[in-house]
C-alpha cells in the first residue's frame, strides 16, 4: 500500500443528541462516559427472507447491556431488537498492546471517524499477553497525552470510554493468546485453558456495570485441529466455548457470548478459519444462562485465499448457497442470531467487488449483524476503511457498505481537524493480523519439476518507514502451481525481523530471506499472495527493491 500523499475529505459532522451518563465499573472506575446516539439498525427487511423481521428494526439509541437473544434477534437493555454494525480496530492483540494508528491520530478522532461511518459497535481485539503487560508502545504522547503511560488494561478502559462517548458499543475479542501469532486452538503450551477462562472472567466482572460493553468473542478463528462437537476435549471447540461461556455469564449474565466456527466441518468440508458453523444444527452451544449465544462466522474474498466456490460457473450467484449452508441457516431457521464477525477486502479485483456486493446484499436481506475487518489501513490482506494517514476515508469501500450502514454521515467537510503531519514515532505500525484463511478446499499440486524461481514474480512495496525500520508488503503472483517459495533482498542496515505474516524471515549477511508459510502456500496458477514484514533497520532500502525468488 502506498502511503497517502494528501489528507482527503473527512466526514462532515459528529452525531447529535449526545448526553452524559455516569457508568461505574465493578472493580474499576470508568466514570462519566458519554453515551452518544448510536447509528440505527437497518431498515426492516420487506423481502421475506428473515426468520424474525423484527430484528431489522431501526434504532436511534445506544446499544447497551444487559443483552439477550430471542430466536434470530439480538435484544438490548431497552427490549428493542438491534442490528450490531461493528468494525474491528486492531492493535491490542499485537506487540504494541494498543490500537494501531495512535501514532497518527488521537483515540477520540478514531472513534469519531468510526461513528461517522455509520457503525454502532467496536470489535476490540486483544491478547492475553497484553492483558498481563505493564506497558504499551507506538502511542504518540502529543496526540494522546493521557494514554502513553497506561497499562494495556487501563488503556482498554479508556478505549471503552472513548467508544461510549461516541455512541459506540464494544465487543471484546480474544484474538490471540500471545501477541505473536494466531493459534489454532483456544490454548497453547504457554497459555492454558484455565488462564483463558480466568482472563475472560476478570474482564466480564471488570465491565459488569459498564453497559456499553455488550459481548465477548471467546476465541478468534479456531482452525486446524479444532473440531465442533467431536467429543475430544483437547480439540472440541464447541465444548470449550461452553465452558468459557458459562464462566463469563457467571460473572456477568448480561453479555452476549459470541462463538465462532471452525475451519473443518464434520462432513469433511473446509471453509475459512472460524467460518464453519454447519454443525450447529446438530450440536448447538447450550449455556447455563439461556438466550445469550450469538454465532459468528468469518468470510473473505478470493484475494485473501482461494476457495472452491470462486471457480464455480455461476459465481457470484452461488455464494448465497455457500453462506446458507455454512452459517446463514442459523438465523433463517430462527435458531440463534448470526454476527458475521469478519469480512474485508482491498476491493481491487472484479472478483472481490462481486463478492462484497453479494455479501452486503445477503446481510441486508437477512437483517444480520456484522463486524467489518478493519478500520485499520495496515491489515496486510485487506487494507482498511481509512488511508495510510488514518484520516482519509476509503470512499469506494464505504460506498459498497452503504446499504448496511444507513446512519453514515456524508463524506464532505471534516468531522474533526485533521492532525498535523508529524514523523512516525518508533516503533512503527505492526500489521500483524494473520489473514483468516485455512488450507484451500482443493490444494493445488505443483507440476513435476516446477519451482518458484521460474513460476512466481514478487513485487516489494514499502508501506511505511521511520528512523529505526520499515514495514514492507510483498505481492507474489504464480504463473503455475507452486507449493513452496522463498524470497530475499539486500538490506545492509537490517539487524532483525520484528514481525512477519505469511512467511518466516531472517536477517543474515546483510540480506533478508523469507519462506512462505501458513496461508501463503501453496499459490495456485494465476493467483496472488500478499505477505509482509516489519524490519528493524536504519530506514528502508531505496526503490525499486530487487527481490530474488527461489525454492526452499
Image: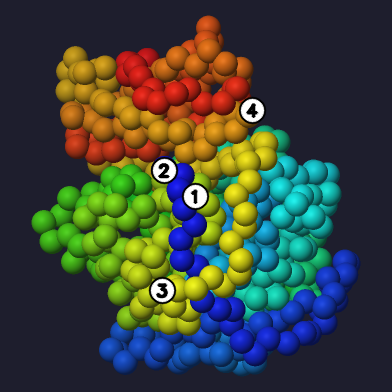
Q: Note whether 27 is above or below 266 in the view shown.
A: below
Asked whether residue 248 appears in the rendered view, the answer is no
Residue at screen point 88% across, 70% down: 29
Label 4 close to label 3 by CB (< 8 Å): no
Report which residue position mark 4 lands on.
468
Residue 330, numbered label: 3
Q: How far across and how far down the image is residue 171, in percent? A: 62, 67
Q: How far across and how far down the image is residue 465, in percent? A: 55, 34
Q: How far across and how far down the image is residue 210, in percent? A: 77, 75
Q: Note whether 66 is above or below 92 in the view shown.
A: below
Label 2 close to label 1 by CB (< 8 Å): yes
Residue 1, numbered label: 2
The local secondary structure at tag 2 comes to: loop
In-front residue for pair 111/180: 111
Q: Residues within 10 Å of mark 1 (few under 14, many from 20)?
A: many
Q: Residue 219, located in which quarter of the rendered image? A: bottom right
Q: Residue 454, located in which quarter of the rendered image? A: top left
Amino acid at each position: 500500500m502506498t502511503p497517502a500523499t494528501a489528507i482527503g475529505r473527512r466526514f462532515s459532522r459528529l452525531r447529535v443528541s449526545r448526553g452524559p451518563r455516569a457508568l461505574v465499573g465493578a472493580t474499576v472506575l470508568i466514570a462519566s462516559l458519554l453515551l452518544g446516539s448510536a447509528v440505527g439498525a437497518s431498515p426492516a427487511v420487506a423481502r421475506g427472507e428473515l426468520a424474525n423481521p423484527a430484528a431489522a428494526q431501526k434504532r436511534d439509541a445506544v446499544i447497551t447491556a444487559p443483552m439477550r437473544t430471542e430466536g434470530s434477534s439480538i435484544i438490548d437493555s431497552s427490549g428493542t431488537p438491534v442490528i450490531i454494525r461493528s468494525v474491528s480496530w486492531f492493535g491490542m492483540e499485537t506487540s504494541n498492546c494498543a490500537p494501531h494508528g495512535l501514532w497518527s491520530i488521537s483515540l477520540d478522532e478514531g472513534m469519531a471517524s468510526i461513528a461517522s461511518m455509520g457503525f454502532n459497535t467496536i470489535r476490540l481485539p486483544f491478547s492475553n499477553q497484553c492483558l498481563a503487560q505493564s506497558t504499551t508502545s507506538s502511542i504518540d504522547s502529543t496526540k494522546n497525552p493521557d494514554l502513553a503511560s497506561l497499562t494495556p488494561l487501563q488503556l482498554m478502559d479508556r478505549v471503552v470510554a472513548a467508544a461510549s462517548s461516541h455512541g459506540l458499543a464494544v465487543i471484546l475479542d480474544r484474538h490471540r493468546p500471545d501477541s505473536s501469532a494466531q493459534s489454532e486452538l483456544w490454548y497453547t503450551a504457554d497459555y492454558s485453558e484455565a488462564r483463558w477462562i480466568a482472563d475472560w472472567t476478570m474482564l466480564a466482572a471488570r465491565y459488569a456495570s459498564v453497559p456499553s460493553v455488550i459481548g465477548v468473542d471467546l476465541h478468534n478463528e479456531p482452525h486446524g485441529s479444532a473440531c465442533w462437537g467431536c467429543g475430544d476435549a483437547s480439540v472440541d471447540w464447541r465444548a470449550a466455548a461452553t465452558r468459557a461461556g458459562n464462566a463469563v455469564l457467571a460473572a456477568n449474565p448480561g453479555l452476549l457470548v459470541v462463538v465462532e466456527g471452525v475451519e473443518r466441518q464434520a462432513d469433511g468440508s473446509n471453509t475459512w478459519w472460524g467460518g464453519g458453523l454447519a454443525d450447529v444444527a446438530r450440536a448447538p452451544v447450550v449455556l447455563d444462562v439461556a438466550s445469550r449465544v450469538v454465532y459468528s462466522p468469518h468470510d473473505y474474498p478470493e484475494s485473501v485465499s482461494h476457495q472452491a466456490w470462486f471457480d464455480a460457473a455461476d459465481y457470484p450467484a452461488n455464494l448465497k448457497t455457500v453462506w446458507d449452508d455454512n452459517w446463514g441457516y442459523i438465523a433463517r431457521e430462527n435458531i440463534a442470531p448470526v454476527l458475521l464477525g469478519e469480512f474485508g477486502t482491498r476491493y481491487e479485483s472484479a472478483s472481490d467487488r462481486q463478492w462484497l456486493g453479494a455479501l452486503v446484499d445477503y446481510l441486508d436481506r437477512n437483517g444480520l449483524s456484522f463486524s467489518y475487518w478493519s478500520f485499520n489501513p495496515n491489515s496486510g490482506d485487506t487494507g482498511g476503511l481509512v488511508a495510510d494517514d488514518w484520516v482519509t476515508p476509503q470512499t469506494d469501500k464505504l460506498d459498497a457498505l452503504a446499504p448496511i450502514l444507513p446512519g453514515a454521515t456524508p463524506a464532505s467537510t471534516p468531522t474533526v481537524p485533521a492532525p498535523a503531519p508529524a514523523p512516525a514515532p518508533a516503533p512503527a505500525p505492526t500489521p500483524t493480523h494473520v489473514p483468516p484463511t485455512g488450507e484451500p478446499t482443493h490444494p493445488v499440486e505443483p507440476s513435476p519439476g516446477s519451482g518458484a524461481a521460474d513460476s512466481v514474480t514478487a513485487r516489494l512495496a514499502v508501506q511505511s518507514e521511520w528512523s529505526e525500520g520499515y514495514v514492507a508488503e510483498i505481492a507474489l503472483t504464480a504463473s503455475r502451481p507452486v507449493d513452496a517459495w522463498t524470497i530475499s533482498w539486500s538490506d545492509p542496515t537490517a539487524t532483525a525481523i520484528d514481525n512477519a505474516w505469511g512467511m518466516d524471515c531472517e536477517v543474515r549477511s546483510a540480506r533478508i530471506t523469507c519462506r512462505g508459510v501458513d496461508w501463503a502456500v501453496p499459490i495456485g496458477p494465476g493467483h496472488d499472495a500478499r505477505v509482509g514484514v516489519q524490519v528493524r533497520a536504519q530506514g528502508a532500502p531505496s526503490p525499486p527493491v530487487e527481490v530474488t525468488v527461489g525454492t526452499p
